[in-house]
């Protein structure tokens, strides 16, 4: 396995490096404007490179089960949607319609639908006939919540790494129940974490590596992968759904808060703008690194609050706390809201 990991590391560097060089040669670059903070044209194909790497991971790692492999292979399709959006700037209807195709395939034909959202001591929430519509709406919600975090260097990557670190921790916590399955899950999570971690070196142009953005291809890909991993974990019944919700808490809170604020202020909900949490924090801190650290740390801190309330009290308390903290987050977020 160690040799496979080493080969995988090298593959990541090679694919990302070649992607950067080819992208600049083909002029596949994001042009700066008044809404964007970068000052020079930058390749937006990092997400496409990662989706290719993840396809290779299916071949390199022979421990993935069918569902894991399907999630990664379908993610390649969603990365193409993101690439088309980066290249031609799709309207929201076209963007959502194209996302629908791989989502519907996995939900309808591969049975990756959310069947229940947990047992809460006094009641069990089974979705029943609402399973498919609830799953599709939740997927579209979370996939595009990830897209909201792609605004400054390292933002989406660092926050996504915090999510995978949490999921790895949760999988490890339950390793005594399904040892073989958990080992496979842990390798799966590592295989997904490695590309986005190495991508950060290119995103910050470390040692003059060709600078890359994830682009919509990357944000949609990782939103897609995380969303289906949460469903996969929930349906395996070894991690409680409320803990899975806590793993992506900052994405959920920010997406709901920002869109609610825009609706209240009668602004366009899906319009690109500089009113996101990372833009506000960047304006306050004047540091990309501090902003990345604060948001990633906030995701982990909120998860720990949810995790210990679940562990020390019960599932229902953790669920109620999730709602209470969202209300607090929204109130604070609304105070510092800014125009698009």
Image (cartoon, helix red, strand yellow):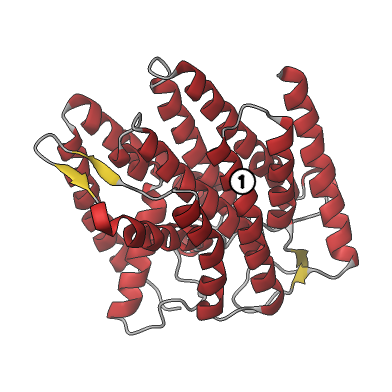
- Name the residue at 35% across, 76% down: 262
In the picture, measured across the screen, residue 304 lies left or right of residue 327, that is right
Q: Which residue is drawn at 61% across and 39% down?
A: 192
The residue tagged with tag 1: helix, strand or loop?
helix
Residue at far front of view: 109
Residue extending farthest to the left is: 122
Identify which residue, 264 or 72, lies in the foreground: 72
Q: Nearer the viewer, residue 337 or 62?
A: 62
Q: Can residue 204 be seen in this view?
A: no
Q: Is residue 290 above or below residue 119?
A: below
Q: Is residue 215 visible?
A: yes
Query: In the shown orientation, is residue 197 left or right of residue 184?
Result: right
Q: In front here: 192 or 322?
A: 192
Query: Circle 1 sits on which residue?
Result: 72
Q: Position of residue 335 (x, y in %)?
A: 29, 67
Q: In which quarter of the image is residue 309?
A: top left
């Amino acid at each position: 396995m160690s040799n496979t990991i080493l080969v995988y590391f090298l593959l990541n560097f090679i694919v990302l490096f070649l992607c950067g060089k080819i992208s600049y040669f083909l002029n596949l670059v994001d042009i700066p404007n008044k809404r964007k903070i970068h000052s020079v044209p930058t390749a937006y194909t990092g997400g496409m490179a990662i989706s290719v790497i993840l396809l290779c991971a299916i071949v390199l790692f022979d421990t993935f089960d069918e569902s894991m492999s399907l999630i990664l292979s379908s993610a390649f399709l969603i990365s193409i949607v993101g690439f088309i959006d980066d290249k031609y700037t799709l309207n929201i209807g076209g963007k959502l319609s194209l996302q629908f195709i791989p989502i519907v395939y996995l939900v309808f034909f591969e049975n990756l639908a959310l069947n229940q959202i947990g047992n809460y001591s006094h009641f069990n929430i089974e979705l029943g006939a609402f399973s498919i519509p609830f799953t599709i709406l939740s997927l579209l919600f979370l996939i595009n919540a990830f897209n909201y975090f792609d605004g400054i260097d390292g933002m989406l990557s660092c926050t996504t790494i915090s999510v995978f670190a949490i999921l790895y921790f949760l999988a490890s916590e339950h390793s005594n129940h399904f040892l073989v399955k958990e080992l496979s899950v842990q390798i799966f999570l590592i295989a997904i974490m490695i590309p986005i971690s190495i991508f950060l070196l290119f995103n910050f142009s470390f040692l003059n590596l060709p600078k890359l953005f994830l682009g919509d291809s990357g944000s949609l890909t990782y939103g897609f992968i995380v969303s289906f991993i949460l469903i996969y974990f929930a349906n395996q019944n070894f991690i409680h759904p409320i803990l899975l919700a806590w793993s992506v808490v900052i994405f959920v809170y920010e997406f709901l808060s920002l869109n609610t604020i825009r609706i209240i202020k009668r602004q366009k909900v899906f319009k690109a703008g500089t009113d996101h949490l990372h833009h506000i924090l960047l304006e306050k801190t004047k540091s990309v690194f501090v902003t990345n650290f604060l948001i990633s740390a906030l995701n982990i801190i909120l998860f720990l609050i949810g995790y210990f309330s679940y562990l020390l009290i019960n599932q229902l308390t953790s669920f109620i706390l999730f709602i209470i903290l969202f209300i607090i987050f929204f109130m604070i977020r609304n105070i510092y809201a800014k125009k698009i």
